[in-house]
Image (cartoon, rainbow, N blue to C red):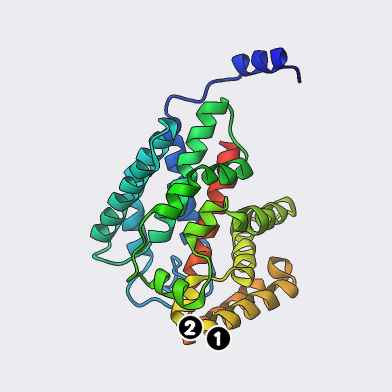
Amino acid sequence: MSAQLQQTWIARAPAPPRDAAYQLARLAVGALHAELACAPKPGLVTPFDSGSHTDMDAATFMRSLFALRGYFVAIAQAGIDHAPFERLRELGIGAESAMLRATCGVNTHRGAIFSLGLLTAQAARLWVAQRRRPTAEQVCNGVRAWRDALQAAPLDPHSHGQRVRAQYRISGVREHAAAGYPVLREIALPALRTALAGGATREAALVQTLMQLIAQVDDLNLLHRGGAEGLAFAKAQAAAFLADGGVAHPQWRAQLHAIGQQFVARRLSPGGSADLLACAWFLHRQELA
């Protein structure tokens, strides 16, 4: 396409709606709700049980979602306004405080506040700048623009995630973000798209994607709860489920229920993979918005 034709196409392209920030915020909250509603999920909270958790249930998650609605609007608008990273960080800190107030101190969405917040901001920025919806890959790669700020931002050395990250010398959410979320681009999104293209329902596609993530990601939550042995066990269970056909198996729900019982017995909860699942669903949905 010549430069002149490209300029003409951009000029004629429909402008993003004035409520773009609100639209993307609704998709972000909707993605978190889709992750919660997805069942069965080994070790994780669903509307039917609390998995490996004794301090939270679906109602706790719903209170958190309600408290985070304004955060996603604000961070989407910050992306549109090309706000500096420090502003995004301030919004994230405020959102975490709102979450903890709503849940009486229970951490339901700290990882999602970070990753889904950054992706929402970048999706909003690109939508307005390009005058068209960005691809999921463009959004992920766009987060690299904040790489230096991400690497310079202070860490909480007392958090479970940072202690595990230091102990096992593995990458955390900060490194994933600075690299443009390769785990989303290379694992989650291909799995989700393949499942949907194959005719899977939303729930089945989300389950398939979650199990791909558990099988391949060094989930800090699994390491925190089960150590290296727990992580290896979870990965092996997920890999075996996928090798047996995944959600294409006629008894996949029963298989996941059995895996879930073993996760609960070991107190395993793949919370990091659940956060990534919500991010993948958001990225998929914003392409279609």
Describe the element under mark 2 as helix, strand or loop.
helix
Pinpoint residue 183: horizontal percent, then vertical percent: 61, 58
Is residue 22 among what the camera can see? no
The quadrant where residue 102 appears: bottom left
Q: Amino acid at mark 2?
A: Gly
Is residue 130 among what the camera can see? yes
Q: Please give the name of the residue rendered at 67% of the width and 56% of the height, measured from the top-left corner.
A: 186
Foreground: 174 or 198? Answer: 174
Foreground: 177 or 252? Answer: 177
Q: Residues within 10 Å of mark 2 (few under 14, many from 20)?
A: some
Pinpoint residue 54: horizontal percent, then vertical percent: 35, 77
Describe the element under mark 1 as helix, strand or loop.
helix
Task: Tell me the distance, in whole angstroms, between the alpha carbons under discs 2 and 1.
Answer: 6 Å
In the image, is residue 181 above or below residue 107? above
Which residue in the structure is indicated by mark 1?
A: 229
Q: Amino acid at mark 1?
A: Glu
Q: Please give the name of the residue rendered at 36% of the width and 69% of the height, measured from the top-left corner.
A: 57
216 to the left or right of 266: right
Q: Please give the name of the residue rendered at 57% of the width and 46% of the height, measured from the top-left corner.
A: 140
- The number of callouts visible is 2
Q: Quadrant of the N terminus?
A: top right
85 to the left or right of 1: left
Which residue in the structure is indicated by mark 2?
A: 226
Pinpoint residue 256: horizontal percent, then vertical percent: 60, 75
Asked whether disc 2 touches disc 1, contact meaning CB atoms under 8 Å apart, the reply is yes
